[in-house]
Image: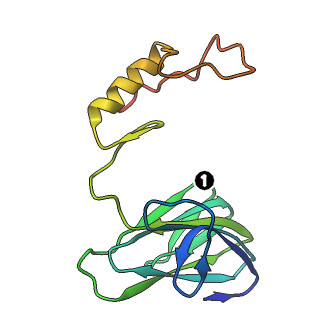
Amino acid sequence: TISGEITAKLIVGELPGIGRIDGVPQNWPMFLIDAEMGKGSEISIPVLAGHEIGVYVVEGDVNSGSEGSNIHTGDASIYGSSKDAKGSATLTAQAKETSRVFIFGGLPLPEPRHMFWNFVHSDKDVISDAAGAWSELDRSQFPPVVGEDNEDSIPLPMKNRK
């Protein structure tokens, strides 16, 4: 459901009542919406039972979720849905000012994911190995970027490394 000045596009996936994008391979139930919202506009997205949904504010200021959480530029909020829930719920996002948001979601992966900086995996040892390879500029793991001198890289943050 949309109210107010909103331009929204389903980028990938499928949402009941909104549509489906064909031609983009997907191996898991998911969706991504890019929405440009005028001040005071509101968008409500169905959340299917067992699915998760998130709101990332590219630019602007948005309230979302049943608590009306305030999300600012560069921030995101993730909302879960119980695997045992019956039927569906709705997530509503309201623009406090002209905003651009990505609304994304789908069925959670069956195994837990771990994250350190740019590395995400279900196995913490794989993340640790990748972080070590990055620190050592291991070009067998991280090939050179074409057109760059490749003499340096972004340093691996040491904070919270496990």
Left or right of 65 in this view: 153: right
Colour setting: rainbow
Left or right of 79 in this view: 75: right
Q: Which one is nearer the viewer's eye here, 95 or 6?
A: 6
Rendered residue at 49%/77% (across/down): 68
Q: Amino acid at mark 1?
A: Gly
Rendered residue at 57%/20% (across/down): 143
Residue 27, position in %: x, y? 45, 59
Q: Which one is nearer the viewer's eye here, 16 or 84?
A: 16
Residue 58 sits above or below residue 36 on the image: above
Residue 89, position in %: x, y? 41, 85
Rendered residue at 38%/67% (across/down): 107
Which of the 4 image quadrants contains residue 120?
top left
Q: Which residue is mark 1?
A: 74
Q: Which one is nearer the viewer's eye here, 107 or 27?
A: 27
Residue 71, position in %: x, y? 55, 64
The answer to whether residue 162 is visible is no
Residue 62, position in %: x, y? 61, 70
Residue 68 sits above or below residue 25 on the image: below
